[in-house]
Image (cartoon, helix red, strand yellow):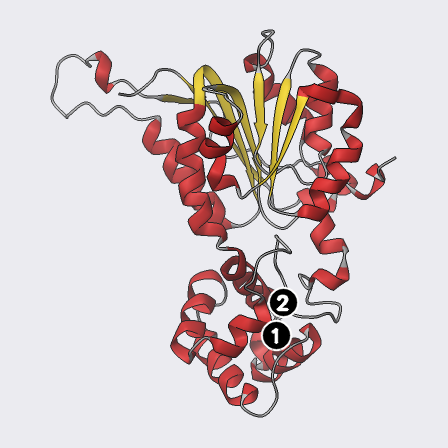
Amino acid sequence: MADNSIHTPVLPELTLKLLGPALEHERAVLVDATLGMAGHTEAFLERYPTLTVVGIDRDPDALAIARERLAPYGARVHLVHAVYDGILSVLSELGIDRVSGVLFDLGVSSLQLDRVERGFSYSKDAPLDMRMDSTGERTAAAILATYSESELRRIFYEYGDKKLAPRFASRIVQSRDATPLVSSAQLVELIAAATPAAAQRAGHPAKRVFQALRIEVNQELSVLERAIPDAIDALEVGGRIVVLAYQSLEDRIVKRVLQARSASTAPRGLPVELPEHRPELKLLVRGAELADDDEKAANPRATPVRLRAAERLRYVA
């Protein structure tokens, strides 16, 4: 049996509540676009006995765990090794035109954080890997070895620490000429030495550097910018999308797309809103839902989560 104890899904009851109304009909299909170890998917399969789930994940290790965990559900589950911006291609290959729900649980997974050798954590020494898909070619070590100082400065500025990005990029380029940066301990030591004492009091100086490298290795933001619109396009009328984001860069993208597609496109001044200008989506929560204190106590990884959800009202030509 799969070791389910290593994964506790975030906001499972709220996710079920928000997606549930779209999944009650007999031919409902849910896409879990970030399957991970299938905690959310298992809950949906148990709750809705006729539901079919398409589970997508870029991480072969997660898919192996999910495949064992979901084996009792047989043909109701289709597992696909892919990045979630390929959602439309995945559905096309399965012969599925429209789906009833899509779930995104973004960011680094519990499995990736807990397996030290994957290199995602700055608190434990490991090779500088950070690939969510272990079959991919680009690693954090390769980025540190090959990116120019200006390229490193850009990713640290855009995805990490704006104030210290130039300092970090400069120190990395100076250091790598003498000693290649291949382990997390090396990088943490370099970042700590380059960080003023006042800045270190605001939190671990390596946190945002590791975040920036992880985002760059996996192209997380560009993938997300493509995936959310495509996921909405895959929804049937009445279908719903739920997205759990854990940092502001992701949440900003999700918020922008959902708000844009839930707004009227009617020009100002029109006395009547024509059908073709009506919103495509209806937002299901005001702003973003956060984890309550009980959820945070039971599952600390829920602490930064911001959940957004919407329902599709109509198709757009």
Residue 116 drawn at (x, y percent): 76, 62
> Which residue sits at x=72%, y=16%?
47
| Left or right of 38 on screen, residue 285 | left
Q: Identify which amino acid the numbered label 2 is placed on.
A: Gly
- Residue 8 seen in this snapshot: no
Q: Identify which amino acid the numbered label 1 is placed on.
A: Gln
> Which residue sits at x=16%, y=12%?
272
Toward the right, the furthest residue is: 1
Q: Are marks 2 and 1 in contact (CB under 8 Å)?
A: yes
Toward the top, the furthest residue is: 26
Q: Which residue is mark 2?
A: 203
User: Which dot marks residue 200?
Assistant: 1
| Left or right of 9 on screen, residue 172 | left
Camera-side residue of 188 and 226:
226
User: Which dot marks residue 68?
Assistant: none
Residue 12 drawn at (x, y percent): 69, 29
Toward the bottom, the furthest residue is: 178
- Residue 24 seen in this snapshot: yes
Q: What is the crowding at mark 1: few (fewer than 14 residues within 10 Å), some, or many (at least 20)?
A: few
Residue 77 drawn at (x, y percent): 67, 24
Quarter of the image with the C terminus in it:
top left
Q: Secondary structure at mark 1?
A: helix
Residue 144 drawn at (x, y percent): 53, 75
> Which residue sits at x=56%, y=74%?
199
| Real-space Cα separation, disc 2 to disc 1, in angstroms | 6 Å
